[in-house]
Amino acid sequence: MEYRSTRGDDQHTLSGAAAILQGLAPDGGLYVPVKFPQPEFKLQQLVQLSYQQIAQLVLSWFFDDFSAEQIKTSVTAAYGDHFDRKEIVPVTKKVGGNYYMELFHGPTLAFKDVALQLLPYLMTNAATIQHSNRQIVILTATSGDTGTASMRGFSDVDGTQVIVFYPYQGVSPIQLKQMLSQPGQNLKVAAVKGNFDQAQTMVKQIFNDQAFNEQLHKQGAQFSSANSMNIGRLIPQVAYYFNTYSQLVKRGEIELGDQINFAVPTGNFGDILAGYYAKKLGLPINKLICASNQNNVLTEFIRTGNYDRNRPFYQTNAPSMDILVSSNLERLLFMIADEDEHVVVDLMNQLQQTGKYQITPEMHAKMDSFVSGFAAEKEVEQEINRVFHENHYAIDPHTAVASKVVRNLQELTDDSKPTVILATASPYKFPETVLKAITGQSAQETGLPAVKQLNQYLGDDIPAGIQELDTANSIAETVIEPALMKNLITKSLIARQ
Ligand SMILES: *Cc1c(COP(=O)(O)O)cnc(C)c1O
């Protein structure tokens, strides 16, 4: 199984281990399989498997340069006690006619944990496979959750260092507290004056800065990424689509072979792309519902084939989806362009120069697995309120975006197939919004006090990952201009020497 860049030809390939270590291709593209795996599996057999076994199977389809033993020990170490449910990713009973796939039972309470508890093991094994003893410097631009989850996953992992950039005043109080209080000698975190798109663009530029990379190599280090741009972050996410399907079959909710829908709160298009990969691998998925907040570039793109980021950027109550340039869309473009890198390069150039592009009707026709919709902030609050008061089930604002979009679609169409909504974060991660939505009252204080106030209404247990913040020591926030990101990286590299 070889990988290539979405912007490079298929003569320049590399192994899965090399692609994971690299993170991003030097030409600015993203790594994709040269030949998409066509595994032979029987759905029926999946139903017998645990989450860990399904994850092993999926990883073995994509990363055949890893030994079975390497994959097994990685998966076992990643998916154990750090999750507060033994199912790792439990699926609810029907709640108001749909299912919720709870992806927030890891240590930092968002779906990012599912991949980022595993990625450090994949990366250290990849270094072994590649005979690399370079220090791996993981650069991460985060809209909130990837930062915390990658700091948590890589904390004090030998041979790695993590540098996280998040938008200044663009993350929730709990997300901020999590990032500023994560212990680890190898972690650095800074706020960037700008939004996520600006931080992500700078990180990409730094990745592709040849002189900087050479300097880093001389120091015995290399960059990698923990964003969903890294194929090693994306593939573990494919597993939970298979697992959810098998859960529903096992519980008798669906029959083997039935088609189901998945609704995904979307930002960088990573999570939903993992669903598309699952469909390509043969999982019976009917529609992938791409749900956006008011930053609804993707809603329009999926409907019309017209991508246009020239629009206001909104800071919303679902901050992890406040994104106008969705990196992983490039991987989808590559597939619907029949793997023609010239088409991808051309579209990405247009995006960079004009902020927009339009795909051909032929390409657009190949996106028929996707449907889209968006929800505004007020609708998000109403949806949290409705789901709670009708079903006594609390959802976070990101999940509520998808939940609302699903309801709108169900009213408009006669699609009666079972639908699974990806619940991407715990409601306790965004207690201010959830409290306000459920009770109509604002939190007296943001952050942990709001968690406690919310808890009085929910009457469940506050997740350990939030409780521990109560006694955690925080560092002061570092705030920098985007132009100083490179400088900060250099300084923290020197500090580590
Ligand atoms: C990151 C994130 C998303 C968006 O996922 P993408 O893979 O970037 O599309 C949605 N919800 C939450 C809670 C997130 O942390």
Image: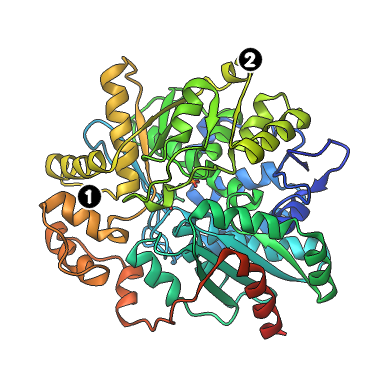
Secondary structure under tag 2 reads helix
Disc 2: residue Cβ within 8 A of ligand 1's nearest atom: no
The earlier-in-sequence mark between 2 and 1 is 2
Q: Amino acid at mark 1?
A: Ala
- Relative placement, left or right, of 347 versus 455 is right
Q: Amino acid at mark 2?
A: Glu
Instruction: Indicate which disc residue 394 carries.
Output: 1
Tell us which disc is closer to us: 2 or 1: 2
Quadrant in the picture for the N terminus:
top right
Colouring style: rainbow
- Relative placement, left or right, of 424 versus 43 is left
Quadrant in the picture for the C terminus:
bottom right
Residue 284: tell me if it is visible.
Answer: no
Extreme right residue here? 11
Q: Neighbour class for label 2 at 10 Å: few (<14), some, many (≥20)?
A: few
Position of residue 282 measured from the top left corner of the image (x, y, whole percent)? 58, 27
Instruction: Indicate which disc residue 362 carries.
Output: 2
Q: Quadrant of residue 416?
A: top left
Secondary structure under tag 1 reads loop
Q: How many marks?
A: 2
For image coordinates 62% across by 23% down, the residue present is 359
For image coordinates 59% across by 41% down, the residue present is 328
Residue 338: tell me if it is visible.
Answer: yes
Q: Is residue 431 above or below residue 392?
A: below
Judging depth in this view, the residue of 224 and 105 nearest the camera is 224
- Relative placement, left or right, of 373 versus 442 is right
Position of residue 333 measured from the top left corner of the image (x, y, whole percent)? 64, 30
